[in-house]
Amino acid sequence: MKMASKVLLLVVEDEQAIAQMYSDRFKMAGFDVDVAHEGAEAISKMVAERPNAVLMDILMPGLSGTEAVEQAKANPATRNIPIVMLTNYPDSIDLKNALKLGAAGYIIKSESTPEQVVAKIQKILAPKPVSG
């Protein structure tokens, strides 16, 4: 069976312009991209689509990014999907909680270019060397 060459990224961001910017940048880098605009939508898309990675805003209406991480990590179907948090507040308790709950890392929106965000996701998805 041939492996799909495309990598699916789920961008979860309530601000339409930011979601579009990241979506466009990842598509230019060769990713397939889907977008969710709040946490509950993100969880249902994660279960249905099994993306290779998720870029998750923390502060969203309804289910927050932190709450979405908690639900994703509690579900065997989505537990192993890496989730990278998007925030402008690196010292926030929400970010610390998301990392404790199992987020794979975080990106400070105001300090990262879209290219840097793509590079971080590519690094997280890169095959890990097998040590023996």
Image: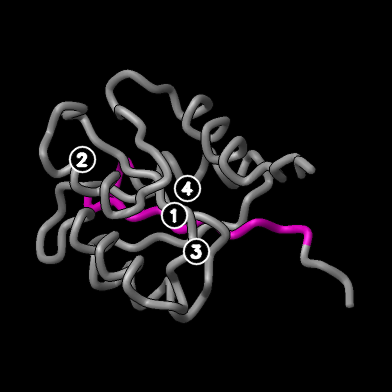
Per the rendering, the mark at residue 54 is 1
Q: Secondary structure at mark 1?
A: strand
Q: Secondary structure at mark 4?
A: helix
Q: Position of residue 60 (x, y in %)?
A: 15, 54
The answer to which of marks 3 and 1 sits earlier in the sequence is: 1
Q: Which residue is mark 2?
A: 95
Placement of the N terminus among the 4 image quadrants: bottom right
**What whole-number distance in Å separates the C-alpha atoms at marks 3 and 1?**
11 Å
Magenta part of the chain: 5-18
**Left or right, 57 with reference to 59:** right
Q: Which residue is mark 4?
A: 23
Q: Which residue is mark 3?
A: 80
The answer to which of marks 2 and 3 sits earlier in the sequence is: 3
Q: What amino acid is at disc 1?
A: Val
Instruction: Pick the residue in front: 64 or 92.
Output: 92
Name above or below for residue 72 compared with residue 10. below
Residue at position x 16%, y 29% in the image: 89
Q: What amino acid is at disc 4?
A: Ser
Q: Residues within 10 Å of mark 1 (few under 14, many from 20)?
A: many
Q: Is the Cβ of the residue at disc 1 closer than 8 Å to that at disc 2?
A: no
Name above or below for residue 130 compared with residue 7. above
